[in-house]
Image: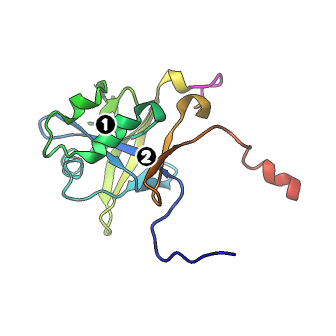
Amino acid sequence: MRKNIGNKPWFYPLPVLIIGTYDENGVPDAMNAAYGGLYTSNMIEFSIGHNRKTFKNIQQTKAFTVSFADVENMAASDYVGLVSGNDTPDKMEKTGWTITRSEFVNAPVFEELPVTWECELVRVTEEGNVLGRLKNISVSEKVLDGEGGISMEKFKPLVFDHATYDYLKVDGVVGKSFEVGKKLK
């Protein structure tokens, strides 16, 4: 038995994305963006309000970073979504994050967030979404496996449940894609 629940934006899972930017004075900012994902193999798209400081910064600098929040940084990741850089000048100091400048784009890298896309703005879509092109991915060595890939057991990325407003963790590998289905062939 199934139950109709209506038209609700319940898309599972939503990665918790932290968008990093600099303003016109080089002051770093970050915000939590739940609505985003891959657009193509080297592009990302996400939706943010046009009144946000982050949106204004992206328009000015034509660059941003997208870091994937993890369990260890859940409180700071939630915090940057609760307060605006427009109203809270010490917002980034309160996170405790170490900020370094990307080598590839004019945007900040938050060292405590282990996986970061460094992107240049392609355009704002007619729906108002930000579309960016990947220039580099930087990864903390603490989340790498023995072959240089990302270990999900070490990374522990955070995902957002839009139905309950809970944060959930990704909890390891359960199967190998393009392999587990072969038994049904």
Residue 50 seen by the camera: yes
Q: Amino acid at mark 2?
A: Val
Q: Which residue is under mark 2? A: 16
Examine the residues drawn in magenta and state their main secondary structure: loop
Give percent across and percent down for residue 157.
51, 38
**Nearer the camera: disc 2 or disc 1:** 2
Q: Give the image's coloring scheme.
A: rainbow
Confirm or deny contact between disc 2 and disc 1 (CB under 8 A): no
Q: CA distance from mark 2 to mark 1?
A: 21 Å
- The amino acid type, in three-letter code, at marker 1 is Val
**Image quarter of the N terminus:** bottom right
Task: Tell me the quarter of the picture where residue 51 sits.
Answer: bottom left
Q: Which residues are magenta?
A: 144-149
- Label whose residue precedes the other's in the sequence (2 or 1): 2
SS type, badge 2: loop
> Badge 1 is on which residue?
105
Q: Is 180 situated above or below 65? A: below
Magenta span has 147?
yes
Side of 81 relative to 10 (left or right): left
Q: Position of residue 150 (x, y in %)?
A: 58, 32
Q: Residue at x 75, y 50 (%)?
A: 178
Q: Secondary structure at mark 1?
A: loop
Residue 75 lies in what quarter of the image?
A: top left
| Residue at x-position 35% and y-position 42% | 78
Q: Position of residue 63 (x, y in %)?
A: 28, 43
